[in-house]
Amino acid sequence: MKRKKAKAKNPVSIKDTPFFDAEAADKPGKVRITMHLDSDVLEHFKRRGVQLGEGYQTLVNRTLRRVVDIENVLLEQLPSALVESMLTIRLTTDEAEGALRKLDEKKSA
């Protein structure tokens, strides 16, 4: 016999939460997902969200977008063997940006 889920006495809508962005929620290309994060990572983004006055999910998305953009630049500009090595050792964003700056400096010289 299946149990019925207990209904919350006072359900809270996501629209009632701080930093809810109805415009962003309705944008094409946005997908709702469920994801497991390390608790310290989640707390970091929540703290930063409060400090910046933004939602933590927006910060997570922006951070992931930045990593994707950097990886795309690496894939386009660096030899594939080097990119493979860099991605294999899980190069950090700061290290990747430093590598790109050095590459730009060499091209300019």
Image (spheres, rainbow, N blue to C red):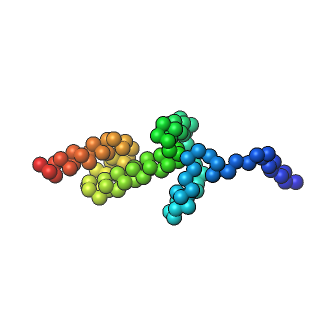
Residue at the spot 43% in from the left edge and 47% down from the top edge: 63
Residue nearest the observer in this picture, 18 or 91? 18
- In this rendering, does residue 41 appear at all? no
Lateral position of residue 20 relative to residue 78, left or right: right
The percent coordinates of residue 75 (x first, y second) are 32, 56
| Residue ranking furthest to the left | 109
Q: Nearer the viewer, residue 23 or 73?
A: 23
Q: How many marks?
A: 0
- Residue that appears at 39% across and 44% down: 90
Q: Is residue 8 visible?
A: yes
Identity of the residue furthest to the right in this view: 1
Q: Residue at x 26, y 56 (%)?
A: 77
Q: Is residue 49 left or right of residue 74?
A: right
Determine the image quadrant of residue 91: top left
In-image side of 14 versus 80 (left or right): right
Front-most of 55 and 38?
55
Residue 62: image x %, image y %? 44, 49
Whole-percent x, y for residue 101 in the image:
24, 46
Q: Quadrant of the N terminus?
A: bottom right
Question: Residue shown at 46%/40% (left/top)?
Answer: 52
Residue 29 vertical position relative to residue 90 in the rendered view, above or below: below
x, y (%) of residue 19? 55, 47
Question: In this orientation, which residue lies closer to the viewer: 41 or 79?
Answer: 41
Tell whether 44 sits left or right of 77: right
